[in-house]
Image (cartoon, rainbow, N blue to C red):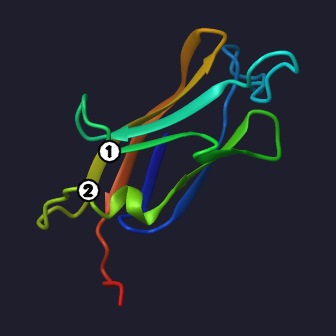
Amino acid sequence: MKLAMIQGDTKAFTFTLYEDDETTPLDLEGEPSGDAPVVTFTARKYQHSTDIVKVSDDGIALGADDGQIIVTIDPADTEDLDVPDYMARYTLLCDIQVESEGETHTRRRGTLVLYPQVTEPA
């Protein structure tokens, strides 16, 4: 996945997550008797940094369709990242993991490119 946004803006990204067969939408509601899966979106510049982290019910909402999630990046998530002034863009590695029944599976991975603000907020 290749994502892009302006640093300091609000941006919502919609994804559909699939089972290992890559055709069956993932059940994100969980069984009535069990816990719902935990979905985590992480974007980072370096392996051990935690630049942006969104988790189920805290920046990640279930979409209208099966397997669909909406990840919302808020201004506060990106505006304080230390992006050098000379850079025309800042690339973060990102992934979406789903934890369910003690197992963790990475369902999507890619990059998030941040472009600098041109207009300064008033």
Q: Which residue is mark 1?
A: 51
> At label 1, which amino acid type do we have?
Asp
Tell me which corner region of the image, top left, top right, bottom left or bottom right, holds residue 105: top right
Sequence-wise, the earlier of marks 2 and 1 is: 1
* Amino acid marked by disc 2: Leu
Residue tagged by mark 2? 81
Disc 1 is placed on an element classified as loop
Residue for point 88% across, 21% down: 32
Q: Position of residue 39 (x, y in %)?
A: 60, 31
Label disc, if present, on residue 114 of the rendered structure: none
Q: Residues within 10 Å of mark 2 (few under 14, many from 20)?
A: some
Q: Are marks 2 and 1 in contact (CB under 8 Å)?
A: yes
Residue located at (22% from left, 35% from top): 46
| Image: 109 above or below 88 | above
- How far is disc 2 from disc 1 in space, using C-alphas? 7 Å
Percent position of residue 13, x then y: 58, 52
